[in-house]
Amino acid sequence: MSSIILTFVFFSLTANMKFNGKKGKKGKAARLRAEALLRAQQEEEARLERERLYRELVERLEAKYEGERESELAQYNSLAQKFLSAKQWKMDYREQAKWEHYLSCDGTPDPTVPQEINTFMSLWCDEQDQDVQLVMEKGEVVLHLIEKLEFLLLETAPEDITDEKQEQYLQVILQLQDLLHQKYNDATQSLLKIASMYEDSESGNMHTVLKDKNVTFCLWANLKMKVRYKDHVFQEAGHAFELPLSLALSSVAVRVLYTRYDHVSPLWVQCQGLPRPEGPATLESAEQPQDTGQGSAEEEEEGTEEPSVPAAEKTGSKGRKSSASLKETSNNTGDIKETQEETEKNSENLEEPSQEEEAPLQEAPGGGEEAPRVVDLEQLVPVGGVFHISVLRLPPQAQDVGDWIMVELLDVGLEEYPYSPGKAEDGTQEAVQITLRLPDNVIYFKVPVLARWDPAGQWWRTDGISKITYEAEKKSITFSMGGFSTVALLQDAHLNLPYQAWELHPTGVDEGLFTITAVFATIQIQIKDNQCMLSSVVVEEEEVLSHITGKWMSPLALRAALKRAGVNIFPAEHSPKYVPVPRKGPLAEVRAYEQMALLAAAFAFAHSKWNGEAGPEQVVFKVSEHLTAGSAKGNHWSLLMFDGEKVQHLKLTETSEAFSEEVQEESEFHSTLYHMVKESASNEAMEKVERAGCMFIDSVYQLLLATRVLAFS
């Protein structure tokens, strides 16, 4: 009985202890919850208090900013007069150059004077039976005249040139291009008339290669018409071909005319920034899947069934490309605005196009079962020049008759041979096999797209080409075609975008270094006064393009040289459709470039990873005072955010975890970058800014506007 009582007491005590333990745990949990709630309330109150204080601070800063805005803009406009001084300097320079050209009497025309250029073209057109070498020499003059007109159109502000004058220059460019190509045709015909005089002792056929810095002229004449000589290698040029049997037994000639320039594509493709036709130059309405390659083997084989396109066509200004109904879309860098309203007009040039996706290869309208694959020239552009490959009818050769040499004269010019591919012995379609040696001074970052020119549709097409073999190390490409065409190698115009990083810093008095780290290359450009120099282009830790590095030239000339070499770091108006970057408002972007250029004599600027996180109407970048000639890597950077009207110093750093627009302590809002950096800058830095030369400022601005580093990085 006693044991039962003891057991009962034990269990009672145990139960009571457990009850009290549970009650204690619940109380502790309640206390913890209460403490957490209190802390949360205190933190929320503290946060609200900070926000209230920050709002009051921002309100005070806004009020002070509004009060000082007018005076700041007045001071800035006084400094910005240097842009107008640069514009006037360039106008005076052009007038002085025209006067010096007039005094030189060197026989070359002024392409802006209709009487002079028309006389030049008329006289050259009347000259008969010119030698190829003479055409090459005259061609260098023609190319210089074309370049002068192109640069004049790019440099001149829209309001400083009439539509009639612009149309005149465009037509002269087209006429000069057509005349130059026609002269190469005439010289080819003259050489073919006497082909038998230069026959090879081994094969009995004629072949020749003539080269200069702009053109490589290769010609082969099938004088003996023997099957065993159906192929030929132009050893001096590296080009080669193999003819189908039917052509090997025909009286034909094969010409491979390589031009470093592109006079085939529309003008707006040849020279970015020139006016573009109002109608689509490519099939912009087509909606096809993205495809930058050459297509499958089956598609390539089917493509050879396309009818051949003659390459030796005589393309006149009417049939090749018309410049009628053109409108100005150039991002002109020569017209710097004095007032804010005029600056807004300039920023309209950077307005982004619609978001419609474009395919690099598109189908032509109204096609049958096998529509031609048309290249989207907004995305893929010819790089490295153009190869005019043509099969020509061999004219009657001179015959020895006793003491006489007789030749049949035909009242026709250069004739294309009417070739249509037949069936080969194995039942497949006949094809011409071509091997082209690619230029050494051009970089292809990826396997290029091979395309042929369709003169009827006025576009580049990728069909009709098969069995493509690209050898990067040998710098050659081999392919087959059903006929003869003008061909080019195309590269994605945006493959080096978006930029990985960029930096601009001064290196001396009116000197600076602009560095862009693109996807495949790192480009360094030195700036001095009104000229630029390509310092280096590094690809995979190797310096390339030695033929254009170390040479001073204008910003426009440097842009053209880099694009010809395959290094395109200059976005076009349609580039946002193809580059995945956040949109940036054109007003903030243009004004930022202008004001950065004004400060570039004493301040360094660089890429910020937060630029993409900021809103579309704001740009974010790093800035630092820089008074030495060395690199800016060790600089103490500040982050600025600018919307075109107000600039603020961000508390944010490049190592912060998240983006914030919070203002740096003891900083203020300002209307311009000039007044923002003046807060903490040294007197020496601001004096350098005041003394900076107008042409150095203009050169920096042109490069910033051409590369658009704030929108494409």
Image: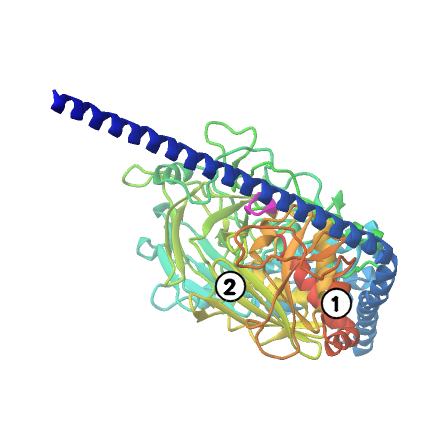
Q: Is residue 445 magenta?
A: no
Q: Closest to the observer: 323 or 195?
A: 323
Vertically, is 17 above or below 321? above
**Residue 403, horizontal then vertical, whole percent:** 50, 69
Which residue does the image show at 39% across and 50% down from the upper left?
Answer: 479
369 vs 107: above or below = above
Q: Vertically, is 15 above or below 507?
A: above
Local SS, label 1: loop
Please give the label number shown on residue 679.
1
Q: Return the x and y of residue 542 as percentages of the image width and height.
A: 43, 70
Q: Quadrant of the N terminus?
A: top left
> Which secondary structure type mostly characterizes the magenta part of the structure?
loop
Q: Secondary structure at mark 2?
A: strand
Hey, which quadrant is residue 205 in on the image? bottom left
Q: Identify the magenta region.
A: 576-582
Name the residue tied to disc 2. 217
Q: How many marks?
A: 2
Query: Does residue 401 appear left or right of residue 675 in this picture?
Result: left
**Residue 713 is at least partly visible in this image:** no
- Please state if 243 lies on the left or on the right of 691 as rendered: left
- Residues 100 and 493: in front is 493
